[in-house]
Amino acid sequence: MLATSRKDFYAGIGLAMITVLIWSGNYVVARGISQQLPPVSLAFYRWTIASVCITPLAWKKFMLEKQVFLEKKQYIFWTALTGVTIFNTFIYIAGHYTSAINLALIGTTSAPVFATILAVVFLKEQTGFLRITGMLICISGILYLLSQGSLEHLKQFKFRKGDMLILISAFTFAIYNTLVRKKPATISPVSFLFVVFAVGTLFLLPFYIYEILNTPPVHWNMNIVYIILYLGIGNSIIAFFCWNASITKLGASGTALFANLIPVFSTIEAVLFLGEGFSNVHLISGVLVIGGLIIANLKKPTEVK
């Protein structure tokens, strides 16, 4: 059930903002590290770190709730498969075939659309005029950034092999969003993430073994280690805690809209840390995306008395 107080509503927005800020570097990492670490290995190391780090926090609650997990094993199977095994792994595989900007833009534009459709069909979430209008404005902002403000530039956009993988990744994450809303109330957030992380990592294991047996050995350095730690702790534990909590407060489709901010944050990070230029195109795109999010969430929940 969605939270009905203003406090929970704004908390949901804050949690979603924290998540997309952390996740904004994921697509850049996927492209940047593609020549140093194979994609399944990157995913496996990431989720192994996440599983190990969350174990001390979750073990006591997991032992109390393990019977519930056994009863809901089919639910856990699909949640782990979509949210952990497939979602980011396909992003990392796609990083070998397409640009970082394609990864971020295609993924963040399509995921909210998929999430909204699934939320309406399976969760019966209400999607009114403001929500749809806000979503379309967000998409227009992403397309404006993609086109660099030029229709001719947009016409030259090429749909590559990696782009299809990103679409699949976005669709599986939309499924994950929908499944999170179905989480049994008897399962605590921390034990839920622990089990989903661990099961998703186990699903990756045979593909990881196959990959390391059929690819050149990794030349390890501290840069790779730092990236894995960033992905395992920041992108996984902290971000998933915040994202799942936001879904319980804003709904699957409402939270998914905030993913449109990822390329905006990625641009800001590129300016701050990589010295890349900032233009009016970035400013206008950011205003459109943020404006779309505001419009989509204009209808606030009724205050609890």
Image (cartoon, helix red, strand yellow):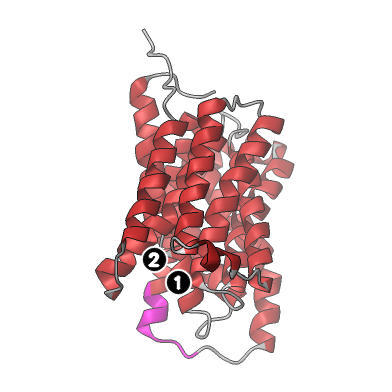
Q: Is residue 236 left or right of residue 128?
A: left
Of residues 266 and 72, the one drawn nearer to the viewer in this rendering? 266
Quick one: SS at disc 2?
A: helix
Residue at position x 50%, y 85% in the image? 36
Q: Residue furthest toward the top?
A: 305
Residue at position x 59%, y 66% in the image? 155
Residue at position x 41%, y 26% in the image? 298
Mark 1 or mark 2: which comes first in sequence?
1
Q: Residue furthest toward the right?
A: 74
Q: Could you classify mark 2 by the number of other residues whose Cα lies within 10 Å: few (under 14), some (14-19), or many (20 or more)?
A: some
Q: Could you classify mark 1 by the number of other residues whose Cα lies within 10 Å: few (under 14), some (14-19), or many (20 or more)?
A: some
Is residue 171 positioned above or below 277 on the image?
above
Q: Are marks 1 and 2 in contact (CB under 8 Å)?
A: yes
- Secondary structure predominantly adopted by residues drawn in magenta: helix
For residue 43, the mark is: none
Q: Which residues are magenta?
A: 219-226
Residue 207 visible:
yes
Distance (Cα) linking label 1 and label 2: 10 Å
Residue 285 screen position, x and y as percent: 40, 53
Q: Amino acid at mark 1?
A: Val
Q: Residue 185 is drawn in which quadrant? A: top right
Q: Is residue 222 magenta?
A: yes
Label 1, on which residue?
29
Residue 194 screen position, x and y as percent: 52, 50
For residue 230, the mark is: 2
Q: Is residue 16 magenta?
A: no
